[in-house]
Image (cartoon, grey):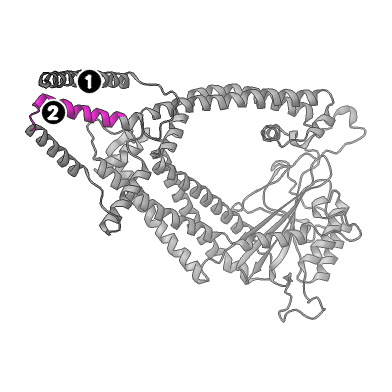
Amino acid sequence: MAEASRWHRGGTPKPNLHYSKEVEIRTTLQELALYFIFLINLCILTFGMVNPHMYYLNKVMSSLFLDTSVPGDERTNFKSIRSITDFWKFMEGPLLEGLYWDAWYTKNTLYDLKNSSRIYYENILLGVPRVRQLKVRNNTCKVYSSLQSLMNECYDRYTSKNEDLADFGLKAETEWKYATPESTFPWHWGFVGVYRNGGFIFTLSKSKSETKNKFVHLQLNSWITRGTRVIFIDFSLYNANVNLFCIIRLVAEFPATGGIITSWQFYSVKLLRYVSYYDYIIASCEITFCIFLIVFTTQEAQKVREFKSAYFKSVWNWLELLLLVLCFVTVAFNIYCNIQIFLLLGDLLKNTEKYSDFYFLAYWHTYYNNILAVTIFFAWIKIFKFISFNKTMSQLSSTLSRCIKDIVGFAIMFFIIFFAYAQLGFLVFGSQVDDFSTFQNAIFAQFRIVLGDFNFAGIQQANRILGPIYFITFIFFVFFVLLNMFLAIINDTYSEVKADYSIGRRPDFELGKMIKKSYNNALEKLRLKKPEEDEDKKSTKSGDLVERARREGFDENEIQSAKQMKKWKERLEKKYYSAEIQDDYQPVTQQEFRELFLYAVELEKELHYVSLKLNRVMRKISTLQP
């Protein structure tokens, strides 16, 4: 019976499947209480994965390596470097000074450990940093025949097919030899291309002076060539005060157009999971989460086996399945990350003279956090399943379900116009305005225009004639016409739904009333509230009134007619004269009109009967007068 009641809320039951309202109310409250426990456990688990110190650690590291200016030029830092000369100035300046901290600000020795660097005095540098570049071969593209006399070399954009694998320069040293990529490590998605691992690699030294000499040596021997397409600078830190690893990757891309495009990644992750007492609380939450997952999976499997294809007719059941899939993916990611940390972390910490590649661990740990974030998002969305029986939520869901066809038709018309404007903006402004540099950027730029975030000056400067025409017509058709049509569809449908609910089309029961009833029952059992008169007592009192009417001489037909009139009166007054109904006009269905008409006929009969009685009494009174 409990399963039947739950299915009634989540899908289409079998025709012969009946349920008791009391059982349904009790089952719904039990499910809601159980799910709140699961949601609280999931919130503790997710917030335990995030530490506010992560933001501050990323902030101070980005400020040190991205915002520090190169020597002799206060306007140039890693974010603003645009040439190879600026790149080497950054390597010999902010990068070198930021990586090697071996003395306190008073020039005193900072620690007893040899060959150790403590960035900002609190973050130990793990291993040594690594610099890696990827190149493309010459003649990977063709020069137009008429221009071959001016240029006979051509270096295309980076792809795995165009990559240069041949040794170059001073071939005797490792940084001039190609290193084979490891297949298990993820590729890097940059602004210009997608880059694989491997390439020409050199690691820095524990000594600041040796590292500076290596930079000078590579610069003088042209380690960066015309074929260079990207350079990665990777290193990792550990802060014992907050038990966080910070994995840093600075990227300089050399597009085929020339110049340098910089980007960066800062990952603050907690790889050492179970250290403090709070970490063991998180571990208990993980175990509880797995128990809930098993219970919910068993319940859904029983529903599928019982209702078969009818199970998949409910949106809430699809949400249940999606949430279960995300939970299982989260558990799989967690297990995989813990195994990789257990296998790799010890090896990475053993040898401090080599580069420790924590990027792999940070990459998968970040994906685990993303999956966990999506999971808790849909877990919160599932609450609508329980509060959908509320009047307001029921009206909202009814409005969306009724106007879905109109919205689909509107969406087709909207996106035809929207994509037409996006392509127009891309073709007209794409070469000069960053917001329209690609077709995808043009789409998102137009969404931002709808929200009021736009760069009209850039559009006007790109094209003095088409710029204002594009902007004005887009605002008029999309903002003033189409969006208001969308709102009109929603408002019109909502008015219809509200009118239907005002004449009695309400949900079978509302969650707020259920909770209020349970609360009152609990207070009555604790004798904190006077018990209300229940239906049995009311029926007993009604029976006493019937017996009294019979003793007074009323016949059975009059008694039954009075009882029916009383029922109609109570029901219709509750429906049409409640405080919730406004004074404005509300439409009446055919069934409601029929009930009102019968009620009026009965009132007319009663009035006629009372009139006859009154006339009879008046005649008797008149005969008694002298």
Overall secondary structure of the magenta section: helix
Q: Nearer the viewer, residue 183 or 590?
A: 590
Q: Nearer the viewer, residue 571 or 319?
A: 571
> Mark 1, residues whose alpha carbon is within 10 Å: few (<14), some, or many (≥20)?
few
Q: Measuring 82% from the left and 78% from the top, which residue is drawn there?
A: 107
Count all numbered tags in the image, as a single digit.
2
Name the residue beneath numbered marker 1.
607
Name the residue beneath numbered marker 2.
559
Q: Nearer the viewer, mark 2 or mark 1?
A: 1
Type of residue at label 1? Leu
C-alpha separation, residue under disc 2 versus residue under disc 1: 16 Å
Q: Is residue 89 left or right of residue 477?
A: right
Upstream in the sequence, badge 2 or badge 1?
Answer: 2
Q: Is residue 174 visible?
A: no
Q: Is residue 385 left or right of residue 68?
A: left
Percent position of residue 533, x then y: 23, 46
Quarter holding the C terminus?
A: top left
Q: For the residue labelled by badge 1, is the local secondary structure a helix, a strand or a loop?
A: helix
Q: Measuring 22% from the left and 45% from the top, which residue is drawn there?
A: 534
Q: For the residue labelled by badge 2, is the local secondary structure a helix, a strand or a loop?
A: helix
Residue 564 falls inside the magenta stretch: yes
Quarter holding the N terminus?
A: top left
Q: Measuring 12% from the left and 39% from the top, which residue is drawn there?
A: 544
Q: Nearer the viewer, residue 378 or 100?
A: 378
Outermost residue toward the front? Answer: 626
Q: Which residues are magenta?
A: 552-572
